[in-house]
Structures are given as C-alpha cells and as structure tokens.
Amino acid sequence: MVASVPHRHYVLAIPKMLRPCFQRHRYLLRSLCKLAHESLKEYPRTALDCPKGVPGIIMTLHTFGEFEVFTPTDFLAAITQHIPDKGTQMVRYYG
C-alpha cells in the first residue's frame, strides 16, 4: 500500500553554455547535486513555515539529453499532469 501524500516533481537543468565546464570537471557535479538538495530542502521549510521539516528527496543525475525551453504554462502543465485527483490512490510498480 502506498501512502497518499502530497508530492512534487522538479527537474533542474544545466544550460548549454555551462555544460562544457561540467564535462571537463566532473567532480563539480557532486557540488551541484548538494546545492540542488539544499535548495529543494529549504524551499518547503520556508513556504510552509516549518523550519525543522525534512522533505523526502530522491535525486537522479542525468548527464545526457537536451535542455528544453518551456513557456511558463507548458512547464506547469508538464510538472502537474502526473498528480492524481484528490481521493485517487495510486500504486506504482517498479522493476
């Protein structure tokens, strides 16, 4: 059984102009992930006024693909389309 909890899906991308720096200096990717983690951790703490809150975060680093530019409405539609309707229970199977 999966608990019905609010969740969000964030995608952070590196602009093409900065990619060569990370390609030549791979060790910087670790620092980038740490900074992303701190930012994602701080946002709900501030927004919810819960300074000791600890969100569950799953991070994956992809070193391939293209940087796509979305309009704000396309971006919001893309990140919220997977959120189920209230009262809907979702079970996901991986593997």
Image (cartoon, rainbow, N blue to C red):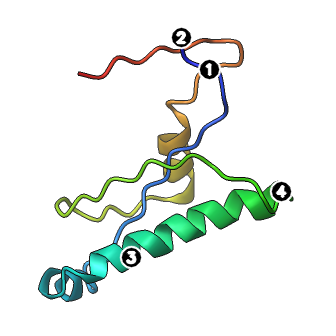
Per the image, label 3 sits on a secondary structure element best described as helix
Question: Going 29% across and 83% down the picture, which residue do you hit?
Answer: 28
Provide the secondary structure element on which disc 4 rests.
loop
Q: Would residue 71 appear left or right of 93 to someone viewing this image?
A: right
CA gap, disc 2 and disc 3: 34 Å
Q: Which mark is residue 32?
A: 3
Asked if 37 appears above or below 30 in the picture, the reply is above
The single residue placed furthest to the right in the displayed view is 49
Q: Secondary structure at mark 1?
A: loop
Q: First in sequence: mark 2 or mark 4?
A: 2
Q: Is residue 10 above or below residue 82?
A: below
User: Where residue 3 is drawn, which disc sits there?
Assistant: 1
Give the image location of residue 70, x and y in percent. Answer: 43, 58
The three-letter amino acid code for the residue at tag 1 is Ala
- Residue under the image location 29 percent in, 65 percent down: 67
Instruction: Give the left or right position of residue 22, taking residue 48 as reference.
Output: left
Identify the secondary structure beneath mark 2.
loop
Instruction: Determine which residue is flagged by label 4.
Output: 50
CA distance for labels 2 and 4: 28 Å
Asked whether the beta carbons under mark 2 and mark 1 sit within 8 Å of each other, the answer is: yes
Residue placed most toward the observer, 62 or 41: 41
Q: N-terminal of the two: label 4 or label 3?
A: 3
Circle 4 residues within 10 Å: few <14, some 14–19, many ≥20:
few
Query: Reading the chain from its start, which is encountered first: label 1 or label 4?
Result: 1
**Crowdedness of circle 1 by 10 Å Cα count: few (<14), some, many (20+)?**
few
Residue 71: x and y in percent read 49, 59
Q: Is residue 78 left or right of residue 23?
A: right
Q: Is 7 drawn above or below residue 86 in the view shown?
A: below
Residue identified by numbered label 2 = 1
- 3D distance between C-alphas at marks 2 and 1: 7 Å
Q: How far apart are the alpha carbons under marks 4 and 3?
A: 25 Å
Q: Disc 1, disc 4: CB below 8 Å?
A: no
